[in-house]
Amino acid sequence: MNLKNFIFDTIIGVALVILHFLSVNTESVNEDNGTSGRKFVVFSIRVAVLIVLALILTCVRYLIFPYSALNTTENLASTSKHYITDDSFYASSDCIKISRINEYNNEKTAFQKTTIKIYCNRTELCTISVDGFYKLYDSSISGNQMTMNDKFTEYEITGQQVFVLEDLAICYHENSIPKVVLFKEIVNQKESVILTATIKKLVSEGNVLLFVNSYEYLKKYDSEFAKSIAERYKNAEFTDNENIYINKIGYRTEFLQTFFKK
C-alpha cells in the first residue's frame, strides 16, 4: 500500500514540475516582447492553471487510490459560560481532528490534539495541550432535563476551596489571587501550604500519578511524608485505592518500583 501511495504521489509531483518548466520556457521565449504588466498577468494565469491542475490530479489520485488521502478535518469545541463572579474555576476545550482513508476505505484518525483553557471569573489563566481527544464535560439526562458536568473535583483544603482537573491541574486561590498549577510543573513550584496539603490529601487517597509528579517537591517541603510513600511504592506495597488507580491509568508497578529505587 505504501509503495502504491508513493508511486501515485511521485507521478503527480513530476507532472506538476514538468508543467511548471514548460510554462517558464514559453514565457522566456516571449520575454523581450512583453511589458511588466503583461508579465504579471501571465504569471498569475500560470499559477492559477498549476493550482487547478494540482487539484485535478489530486482528485484523480483519490478516485483511483484513496488510501492515506486526507478525508476530513474537524474542530470539536466544548465550553461553558459563567456570568457570576464566584471565584470558581471552569474550562473550555478545542480539539483538532484530522482523518485519512485507510486501506479498507474506512476513515481513520491520523492526528488529534485537544487544547484546554482554564478560567476564573472570565479571565483565562492557562492553556494545556493534550494529545488525543479529551472529553471535558459529561452529560446526564433526568426526565426531560440534561445536565452538563465538568471534570473538576472540588475539595476543601485548609478552609478554602480547591478545584482539581483530573490528572492535569490543581486550581486554588492564594492571597486572593487565582492560581493554576499543572501536575507536570509541580516540581518547579515554591512552597505553598495549600498546594502541599492538596497533594498530600490526593496522594493519601491513591493518586499515584500525582505523587510521581510531586515527589521532588515533597522531598523539599515535607520529606517525611515523601519518604514514607516512596518506601511503600519501592516495595510494591500499594493500598486498594492505589491499585485501582494504577489499573485505571495503565501504570506498571515495576516502573514505580524502579522510579523510587533511584
Image (cartoon, rainbow, N blue to C red):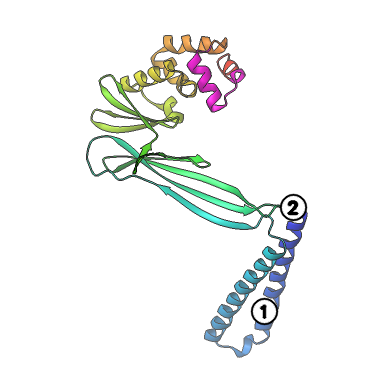
SS label for mark 2: helix
The residues colored magenta run: 238-255
Place residue 142 in its image quadrant. top left
Q: Kindly indicate whether the residue at mark 1 contacts the one at mark 2 (C-beta within 8 angstroms).
A: no
Q: Nearer the viewer, residue 82 or 257?
A: 82
- Looking at the rendered structure, the kind of residue marked 2 is Asn
Give neighbour class at mark 1: few <14, some 14-19, many 20+ (Cα, 10 Å). some
Give neighbour class at mark 2: few <14, some 14-19, many 20+ (Cα, 10 Å). few
Q: Is residue 67 magenta?
A: no
In the displayed structure, 258 sits above or below 32; it is: above
In the displayed structure, 60 sits above or below 254; it is: below
Q: Position of residue 137 (x, y in %)?
A: 40, 39
**Residue where numbered disc 2 is placed:** 2
Q: Position of residue 81 (x, y in %)?
A: 30, 45
**Residue where numbered disc 1 is placed:** 23
> Which label sits in the foreground, 2 or 1?
2
Q: Main secondary structure of the magenta part?
A: helix
Q: CA separation, marks 2 and 1?
A: 32 Å
Q: Is residue 153 left or right of residue 9?
A: left
Of all residues, the one furthest to the bottom in this rendering is: 33
- Looking at the rendered structure, the kind of residue marked 1 is Ser
Query: What count of labels does the image hold?
Result: 2
